Image: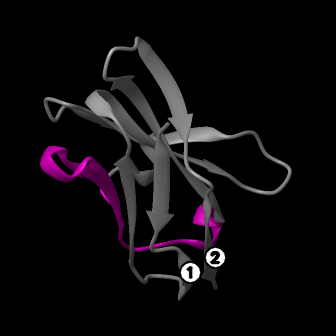
Amino acid sequence: QVHLVESGGGLVQAGGSLRLSCAASGSIFSIPSMAWYRQAPGKQRELVAAISIGGSTRHLDSVKGRFAVSRDNAKNTVYLQMNNLKPEDTAVYYCNAQIILVGRSQSDHWGQGTQVTVSS
């Protein structure tokens, strides 16, 4: 069984910063990919940023230059540093991980979500 525990969301003024964290726990052999998604009210969930086990990253165009994804493989943790936040970044942010458990095949896992609210 795998658990993804997120932290770091909250309320911030426009122009401010937040850092999200997501730690995976369980009988984990490897985590090939970790990512952050977000879903605003009335909108579809979208990929914000992703990072491979080797450190290759990709970011949503609208957050490039403001957000940065990183990971600590020893801690099975992914981070999302969010700077210069804008009201349109307001959403529930979800951690996602493609995980290979010991003795199992790769599977998809989600965190519970953390609210990020940016006031104007």
Q: CA distance from mark 2 to mark 1?
A: 6 Å
Residue at image mark 1: 10
Answer whether residue 61 is magenta in the image: no
| Left or right: 11 as drawn, with respect to 97 | right
Q: Are marks 2 and 1 in contact (CB under 8 Å)?
A: yes
Q: Quadrant of residue 29?
A: top left
Answer whether residue 89 is magenta in the image: yes
Q: Using the image, determine if residue 36 lies above or below residue 52.
A: below
Residue stretch rendered in magenta on the structure: 65-90
| Left or right: 117 as drawn, with respect to 64 | right
Nearest to the observer: residue 19 or residue 24: 24
Q: Position of residue 117 (x, y in %)?
A: 63, 76
| Left or right: 60 as drawn, with respect to 40 | left
| Left or right: 70 as drawn, with respect to 19 | left
- Residue, x 31% and y 22% (percent of image)? 102
Let me know if residue 107 appears in the view. Answer: yes
- Residue, x 52% and y 82% (percent of image)? 14
Is label 2 in a helix, a strand or a loop? strand
- The three-letter amino acid code for the residue at tag 1 is Gly
Q: Using the image, determine if residue 120 lies above or below residue 96.
A: below
- The three-letter amino acid code for the residue at tag 2 is Thr
Quadrant including the C terminus: bottom right
Numbered tag placed on residue 117 in the rendering: 2
Question: Is tag 2's residue or tag 1's residue first in the polypeptide sequence?
Answer: 1
